Amino acid sequence: MKLKLTALALILLFSEMAFSQQSFVQTINLDTSITKTYDSASFYVKNPTNKVMTVTNGRTLNSMFFLRSTSFTVNPNDSVQKWVIFRTNQNITYRDFIIYDVNVLKNSLVYYTVATGKYADVLYAFTQGLIDEELKTALKNFTTTGYITLGYNVARDRMYESIDDYDNNDTLECVYTGRRAYVPNRAGAGNVNFNCEHTWPQSFFNSNDPMVSDVNHLFPTDDAANNARSNYPFGFVLTNITFNVGGSKLGKDFEGATVFEARDKHKGNVARALFYFAVKYGNQGGFTGGKQEDVLRQWNLIDTVDAHERTRNDRIKQYLNVRNPFIDHPEFIDRIKSTYTTILNIPRPKTSAAPSNATYDTLAKNDTASYYIAIFNSGTGNASISNVSSSNGVFTVESFPSTIAQNTFAYARVKFKPNANNQTFNGLITITSSDTVKTVNVTGYSNSQTAGIATLSTQVPDRFALSQNYPNPFNPTTKINFAVPYRSFVTLKVYDLNGREVSALVNNILQAGTYQYEFDAAALPSGTYFYKLETSDFTSTKKLILIK
């Protein structure tokens, strides 16, 4: 693996007390790398606060990028080195986001990252960075420039005598059934019931040259299989099977239409031959469409290019002076939205949001805090944000962007203002855009302004501990003591018998020491409850009884 260490790429932040939204987003640039190899770049994640920063759910939006580690901690005012890794099979440039959810800031940490793939072979360098119509045009020129039209008789001679004679013994194999026969030449084919299959049926282009003699879509077949296929489209056969030999079938698909299904060994060959034909000659006779192309895209993945297909491509090049680029690079089809019709340059924004779960600090009643939800556009064209709404009135959407340009992000600001003490508040933020609807879960906690944590001792305990509350039973207040042996993020919560959280007493970082929390349950009904102390290294639960 090739490793590249960037300069100290730090996320610069405003002071947490002032405004926690990122003021500058670092771009992590990777070198241009050869496709199907790994490249990586380092960067630093900085903690600008005086608290331990826990980083969770590190991720990217594009599968070409991935992170070596997705969860870790960063000490106060420190930084840690991390790596982003890139791998692609396409010779294009990718832009993406690196996103980390963190506990001490009011937004996710975000980086930009950019990387470019390049083919090792120079033959297809002309396709660098091309997609859709530009790529189709380039491939059409590639498959037509210098093309030699053999004529139908000569084309079949070359196919029977050389191109498909893989064992060099004049024995051919039907691509649909697997039947093998001695076929020394075109005349001999008829003697053993073999003929020439046009994968794109010749009736759709009136048997005209150069299509009729383009061996890239011609294959030797058994007469019966060729007749069964006729000029039916390709598809997955499910019912009403009238032909079933060697794995190839004729029957009805899921819509009840008659289709021909090639055996698995030939599925990919069919797909790549038709991709070649459609890009080079257009949708002759309207033979193909979205339904069939969806099937062919699946077949391209089911049956990958093998040695015979590569050999065939090389031999065809000797006679026709062109190659099928979808055999050399079957991934080209993933960069072409449609082979059968003109691809319109329509903006296709793609939105997402971070974090998926936002948690606010514990506040007193009527105090406020804001969280900044990042909204990303990883598609093409601008994303329009029509609305950002909240399902719970204690969470108020203060502002949101109306437009997000492609490959950028912006923040929606959501304020939390609890309207009661000692409560847990949950809500759902809904982001409506021109692409889709995204949601973010939000959680906030409230504490009493008078009841809270008292430090009983700053002497360092030797272990975590949770004591039984006293008094117990109680009405309406009781004291809960607990010990923390080292600086930790601590939660102390109360649950009812059904496991529902009814009160969050502690939800922050505590230094080492022994603490007491006076719990006021005046707002709760009589009954049995459980209180739970939890850190990253410790969990303990005890029972308390409220009697009014």
Image (cartoon, rainbow, N blue to C red):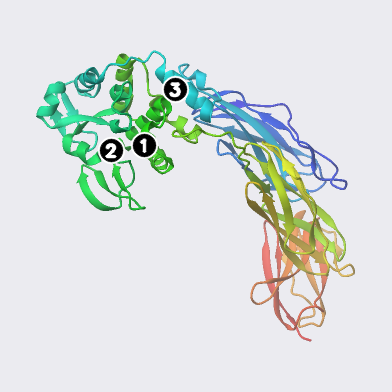
Name the residue located 48 percent from the left edge and 16 percent from the top edge.
Answer: 122
Q: CA distance from mark 3 to mark 2?
A: 24 Å
Badge 2 amino acid: Asn
The image quadrant of residue 311 is top left
* Relative depth, front residue between 127 and 492: 127
**Residue 508 higher or lower than 421, as above or below:** above
Which of pointers 1 and 3 indicates the residue nearer the eye? 1
Quadrant of the frame with the N terminus: top right
Looking at the image, tell me whether mark 2 or mark 1 is earlier in sequence order. 2
Q: Which residue is mark 1?
A: 287
- Per the rendering, the mark at residue 140 is 3
Give the amino acid at mark 1: Phe
- Tell me where residue 212 appears, x and y as whole percent: 29, 25
Circle nearer the N terminus (1, 3): 3
> Disc 2 to disc 1, how far (Cα)?
9 Å
Which quarter of the rendered picture does the C terminus lie within? bottom right
Is residue 138 in sight in this rendering? yes
Q: Which residue is mark 2?
A: 231
Where residue 88 appears, as percent x and y from the top left, is: 52, 31
Q: Secondary structure at mark 3?
A: helix
Residue 288 x/y as whole percent: 38, 37
Asked if one can make out residue 71 in the rendered structure from this viewpoint, the answer is no
Label 1 sits on a secondary structure element that is loop
Contact between labelled residues 1 and 2, with CB atoms less than 8 Å apart: yes
Contact, mark 1 vs mark 3 (Cβ under 8 Å): no
- Of label 3 and label 2, which has the lower sequence position? 3
Q: Is residue 184 above or below residue 112?
A: above
Instruction: Give the total of numbered labels.
Output: 3
Q: Quadrant of residue 284?
A: top left
Q: Amino acid at mark 3?
A: Lys
Q: Residues within 10 Å of mark 2 (few under 14, many from 20)?
A: some
